[in-house]
Image (tube, grey):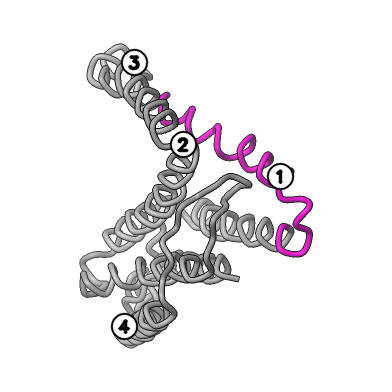
């Protein structure tokens, strides 16, 4: 019996991007780190800054360095990405100073807050697409279902924060529009519907033997982290 037939009889396809060990660390390691960090800060708010510093030093800087390494690793890369390496940082720096001197520090914090929300959600969507493409010939999922299942919970969380009347983020002033509770409840309904629809689709693929374990694990980690973030 082929590997595909054996997996199909169990209801699953592995769908790993780079192998079981790598993907397990990537999915579960990152998720557990995020949940543990959130739990520490939730129960010990006084440890927020040490946790934030650890995140920046152990995870954030590596991400930035890896990005520039990819852009300028070779002479050809540097020539191809000259605008991104040499000019874009100057433009961004000028924009930051312009915002600060024209509107104040709250404008920079606000842009950062919403950009980070968009960045992490869009990043999760991109990763989910990679996992789906890994077994695209057998796994089926409606495009709009993927979009809803990835974006609905973060959107619910963002609107929930808006309903709480936040005026401070990272101990700095921020502007988050006040959101009516009715809008938050509507967003919650859309998110719950999206999760239910996604789970039903997983069940249908499981019955056909085409459910991707890696994709399912990643999506679960994405949903759990953003739901936890609303606590």
| Label 3 secondary element | loop
**Residue span colored magenta:** 41-69
Mark-to-mark CA distance, 1 and 4: 41 Å
Q: Which residue is mark 1?
A: 49
Residue mark closest to the camera, 1 vs 2? 2
Q: Mark 2 or 3, which is nearer the eye?
A: 2
Give the CA separation, mark 2 to mark 3: 39 Å
Mark 2–mark 4 distance (CA, rounded to whole Å): 47 Å
Residue marked by disc 4: 201
Q: Residues within 10 Å of mark 1 (few under 14, many from 20)?
A: few
- Residue 102 position, x and y percent, is 38, 31
Left or right of residue 116, residue 46 in this image: right
Q: Residue at x 36, y 55 (%)?
A: 127
The quadrant in which residue 32 appears is bottom right
Our reading of the magenta stretch's main secondary structure is helix
> Element at badge 4?
helix
Q: Are marks 4 and 3 in contact (CB under 8 Å)?
A: no
Q: Is residue 44 magenta?
A: yes
Taking the magenta stretch, the answer to whether it contains residue 126 is no
Whichever of labels 1 and 4 marks the residue nearer the N terminus, that label is 1
Residue 104 image label: 2
Q: Nearer the viewer, mark 2 or mark 4?
A: 2
Going from N to C along the chain, the mark reached first, 1 or 2, is 1
User: Which residue is painted at 77% across and 64% down in the image?
Assistant: 43
Place residue 84 in its image quadrant.
top left
Q: CA distance from mark 4 to mark 3?
A: 44 Å
Q: Which residue is mark 3?
A: 74
Q: Nearer the viewer, mark 1 or mark 4?
A: 1
């Amino acid at each position: 019996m082929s590997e595909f037939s054996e997996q199909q009889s169990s209801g699953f396809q592995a769908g790993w991007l780079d192998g079981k060990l790598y993907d397990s660390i990537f999915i579960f390691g990152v998720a557990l780190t995020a949940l543990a960090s959130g739990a520490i800060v939730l129960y010990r708010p006084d440890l927020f800054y040490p946790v934030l510093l650890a995140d920046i030093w152990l995870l954030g800087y590596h991400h930035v360095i890896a990005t520039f390494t990819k852009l300028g690793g070779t002479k050809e890369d540097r020539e191809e990405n000259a605008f991104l390496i040499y000019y874009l940082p100057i433009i961004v720096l000028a924009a930051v100073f312009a915002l600060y001197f024209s509107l104040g520090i709250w404008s920079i914090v606000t842009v950062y807050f919403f950009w980070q929300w968009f960045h992490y959600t869009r990043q999760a969507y991109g990763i989910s697409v990679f996992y789906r493409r890994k077994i695209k010939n057998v796994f089926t999922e409606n495009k709009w279902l993927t979009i809803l299942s990835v974006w609905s919970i973060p959107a619910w969380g963002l609107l929930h924060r808006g309903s709480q009347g936040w005026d401070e983020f990272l101990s700095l002033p921020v502007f988050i529009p006040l959101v009516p509770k009715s809008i938050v409840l509507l967003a919650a309904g859309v998110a719950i519907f999206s999760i239910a629809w996604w789970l039903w689709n997983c069940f249908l693929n499981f019955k056909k033997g085409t459910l991707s374990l890696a994709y399912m694990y990643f999506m679960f980690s994405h949903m759990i982290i953003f739901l936890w973030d609303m606590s």
